[in-house]
Image (cartoon, rainbow, N blue to C red):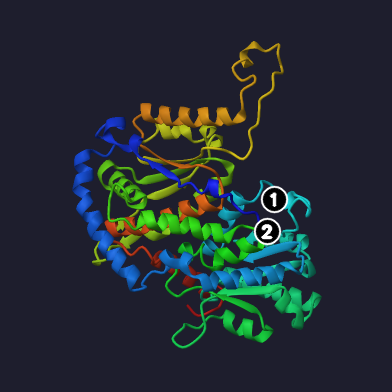
Amino acid sequence: MKKTPAKEYANIEINITRAKSAAVSAAHGITPSEFKEIEPRVLAAHKILRKERKEGKYGFYDLHKDKASLAEVKKAAAHFSSFGYENLVVLGIGGSALGITALQTALNPPYFNSLSKRRRKGLPRLFVMDNIDPDTFRAMLRLCPPKKTLYNVISKSGETAETISQLMIVTALLEKHVGAKALKDHLVITTSPTGPGAPKSLLHPVAKAYKLSSFAIPLNVGGRFSVFSPVGMFPAAMLGMDVDVMMAGCAAMDKLCSKPSLTENPAYLRAAVQYLMDVKKGKSMSVMMPYADGLRDIADWYCQLWAESLGKRLDLDGNEVFAGQTPIKALGATDQHSQVQLYREGPNDKIFNILEVRRFNTNLRIPDTLSDIKELDYLRNKSMNKLMSAELRGTMDALKASQRPVMRITLPRLNAYTVAQLLYMLEVETAMAGRLYNVNTFDQPGVEEGKKIARRLMGGEA
């Protein structure tokens, strides 16, 4: 695994200056009195969250401390890597898929699957099967011969119809091409734990029947908060990512996110701004717009985290509230040419979260060419890096001119340490936001009804 140099262990930075009233007016920015008014609520919510964490009610906070689980993941990854698989196929949906997709995009080279095995340093290609489109799934099966593929099926309950249907197809294929006895070398299970008091998973008998390696998802960790559990860490380790550095990034951010402070706790500060923007300023939508291709799938991961956690009909007291912001993903500079027109001149109902990387891994010079076109002189001998920075600043300044509030997150470098910090902070931010909205951050009743209907339509019991 490629290690991150110690000098790169720098914390991400949060800046909310452009979300304040001084920047975009009191009508669209948070005023000092509004910050002062919400501070006691944040501190009260902090006490509740700390108590629930201590009681083990929600386990995502402490996944980075689970050294036994991480050691198990690393040992299994070393074992399965010795087989020299060409492909790693993740069978999972929602929180079982979005986390590893975000990590792969952020931490492995662009076009990773298109690189030769030598340039991938012997690592397998990754295919995340997060849907049941039959054309897509068939194409994956053709690209990934069973004998050269490791499958990781992820479902906490083992009852996710989409994932289990995929597993049934893969199991039949493996039995045909490698034999039932060899399934243990091609299929890994990630599901709920076994033992007294643990709920039954339909994947438990599968693991037992074929003697499969199995990882446990802690009972107190929901899917969208599971990226630092074996759900994300086993495939990450298989793909050569430095899981130890990720845990160090989580630990560093945990220290910051444990502070009982509105201003010194980055997760609480962002949660308060997001919440106030929604309930006080009419910003019912939250746009995440990274200015780095490596961060584009983090915006996708964030959409599930924010929407599924906060979009609730009822609050904790049973009142009908229809709470939550609508998360939107965008990409800079790409979506300056498709969405920013709306963002600047359409309804002023959005808060913008700009993500940036201060220093890219590449510095790409724009050459002194096409000399006959004088209008291009401003680009000659500059860098694409400088142009990206200028585009980012231009978008932020244009949004400010239109009184559109912006929060900024800066990663010093794009690496395992900073990406882990970012994901961990957004998880804690979501937990705090749920408390401010007074909703259950960790359930998803609106999703379950559709699953029941689909099951009935397939002839099963709801």
Q: Which residue is mark 1?
A: 112
Residue 133, percent across and down? 64, 60
Would you say the residues marked 1 and 2 are in contact, meaning their CB atoms lie under 8 Å apart? yes
Which amino acid, mark 1?
Answer: Phe
Q: Residues within 10 Å of mark 1 (few under 14, many from 20)?
A: some
Rendered image quadrant of residue 55: bottom left
Rendered image quadrant of residue 155: bottom right
Any mark on residue 126, and which?
2
Single out the residue that lies furthest toward the bottom.
196
Q: Residue sitting at 59 percent across and 61 percent down? A: 130
Distance from Cα at disc 1 to Cα at disc 2: 8 Å
Residue 179, percent across and down? 78, 80
Which amino acid, mark 2?
Answer: Leu
Mark closest to the chain's N terminus, 1 or 2: 1
Q: Can you say whether 366 is above or below 204 in the image? A: above
Residue 309, percent across and down? 39, 60
